[in-house]
Image: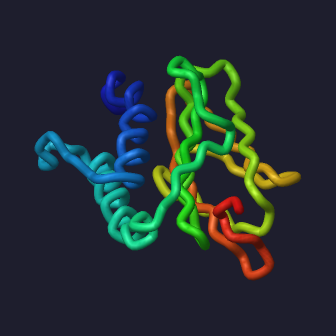
Amino acid sequence: MGDPTTERLRPLIATVPTNAVLGRIHLDSCLDPLDPGRSALVARAAGIHKGCRSDLARDVPRWPPGLPRRDAGQIAPAVDCGEVAYLAVWRRGSPSDMIDLPWPAGHDLTPLVPPEAAQVRWEAGAIHVRSREPRSAALLRPSKTVEGRPCRET
């Protein structure tokens, strides 16, 4: 069993790369004291960011559930890049573990950071995300399938 503080903070630690991947990665501490799990999370996020930089150069911000209030318990900013999008889903102490996000059908959905943070399913033109932890975040990548429409709303 690990350090209780570390175990309690693990879901919060996993939220850090979620926004970094959508913007610029800034690391403000030494990486060498990180345990192997945290180090792997940082390395995975940096690799994902490198892989999506060309997409992000043409992104358009989107708020599928609408602009949130400052104290919103759940938020979901996205950036549409045409054929692919990046969707950050945040549960910020909300009593509900489910967030429903309107999104056009015809997309594949890939959980990116951390891949196990949320259970995700499609149904009736919406992405349904269930997060186990009251304070957590996940980054998802919807991408257009052959028969689907582009992510960007027209």
Reply above or below: 9 against 19: above
Compared across the picture, whether 59 is left or right of 106 comes to left
Above or below for 18 versus 67: below
Q: Position of residue 34 (x, y in %)?
A: 21, 44
Q: Residue at x 63, y 62 (%)?
A: 142
At 72% from the left edge and 44% from the top edge, which residue is drawn? 101
Q: Quadrant of the N terminus?
A: top left
Left-right relation of 75 to 19: right
In front of the other: 125 or 14 = 125
Dividing the picture into quarters, in which one does residue 76 lie? Answer: top right
Give how far across and how far down residue 97 sits, in percent: 68, 29
Residue 113 visible? The answer is yes
- Report the residue at 45% width, 69% height from top: 55
Left or right: residue 123 versus residue 59 is: right
Place of residue 131 in the rendered image (x, y in percent of width and height, measured from the top left): 62, 36
The residue sitting at 60% across, 29% down in the picture is 74
Would you say 101 lies left or right of 48 here? Answer: right
Question: Which residue occupies the extreme front position in the image?
Answer: 154
Q: What quarter of the picture does the C terminus occupy?
A: bottom right
Q: In terms of image quadrants, where is residue 96?
A: top right
Residue 116 visible in rendering: no
Vertical placement of residue 139 versus 92, above or below: below
Q: Residue furthest right?
A: 124
Q: Which percent across, then down, holds residue 114?
A: 47, 50
